[in-house]
Image: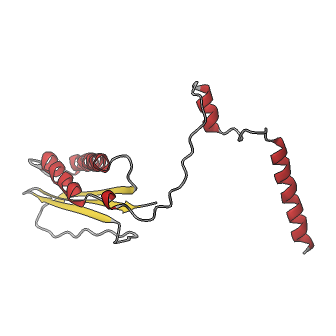
Amino acid sequence: MAMKSLFKRKVSMILQSRRDSMPLGRPPRSASTSANEDEGLKGPQVVLENTFQLAPKDSQKFPTKKAEDILKTTFLTHLLDTKYNGDTCKNLTTQITETVKTQVKAELGNNNRFKVVVLVIIGGNTGQGARVASRCLWYPQYDRFAQYEYHNESLFAVGIVYGVYYE
C-alpha cells in the first residue's frame, strides 16, 4: 500500500510541474504548429474530432461494379497485345496496380472511409493451372471486393480490389 501511495504522489507532482510550466490560455507548442508559424500561416490549427461512425452510409457503399469496370479497362489497355516476359510483367504489374488504385480512390472521392487494397498477378499461360487465394479480416456487411480475370495466348492476369471499411 505504501508503494501505491508513493507512486501516486510522484505522478501527481510530475503532472503539477507540467501544468505549472505551461503558459496560461495556450496549448503547448508542437512540431506541427511551429512549422505552420514558420511558413507564415496564421490562425488556430483545426483539430477534427472522431465521428465514431461504425457503419457506412447507404450513399457511401464501396462501388464494386465500378471497381470491376476499372480493372477491366486497365487490363485491356495494358495487356491486349502483350506477350509474357518475366521482367516486363514485373514492372507492368506495379504500373497496373497503381493505376487501378488511383482510379478507384478517385471514384470514391475525398470523404470515403474505405481502405483500398489492390492485388494484381500476371503469369505465363503455358497450359498449367493456377489458383489465387488471399485472406484477411472481413466484415461482410460493409467490406467488398471486385475481381477481374484476363487471358490471352501468352499470359493470364488476375486483379482483385478490396474495399475494407474502417472508422
The residue at 87%/54% (across/down) is 13
Can you say whether 154 is above or below 41 in the image?
Answer: below
- Which of the pair 148/164 is nearer the observer? 164
Q: Is residue 160 left or right of residue 165?
A: left
Can you say whether 73 is above or below 38 in the image?
Answer: below
Q: Quarter of the image for the N terminus: give it.
A: bottom right
The residue at 34%/71% (across/down) is 141
In the image, farthest residue toward the top: 40
- Give residue 161's position: percent from left, percent from top: 28, 58
Looking at the rendering, which quadrant does residue 118 occupy?
bottom left
Question: How many numbered marks have been drawn onto this rendered protein structure?
Answer: 0
Q: Is residue 77 left or right of residue 9?
A: left
- Which of the pair 35/120 is nearer the observer? 35
- Give residue 104's position: percent from left, percent from top: 28, 50
Looking at the rendering, which quadrant does residue 67 occupy?
bottom left
The residue at 54%/48% (across/down) is 48
- Give residue 116's position: percent from left, percent from top: 35, 55
In the image, farthest residue toward the bottom: 1
In the image, farthest residue toward the right: 2
Q: Is residue 67 left or right of residue 139?
A: left
Looking at the rendering, which quadrant does residue 144 occupy?
bottom left
The residue at 28%/63% (across/down) is 145
- Give residue 88's position: percent from left, percent from top: 21, 46
Can you say whether 23 is above or below 93 in the image?
Answer: above
The colour scheme is secondary structure
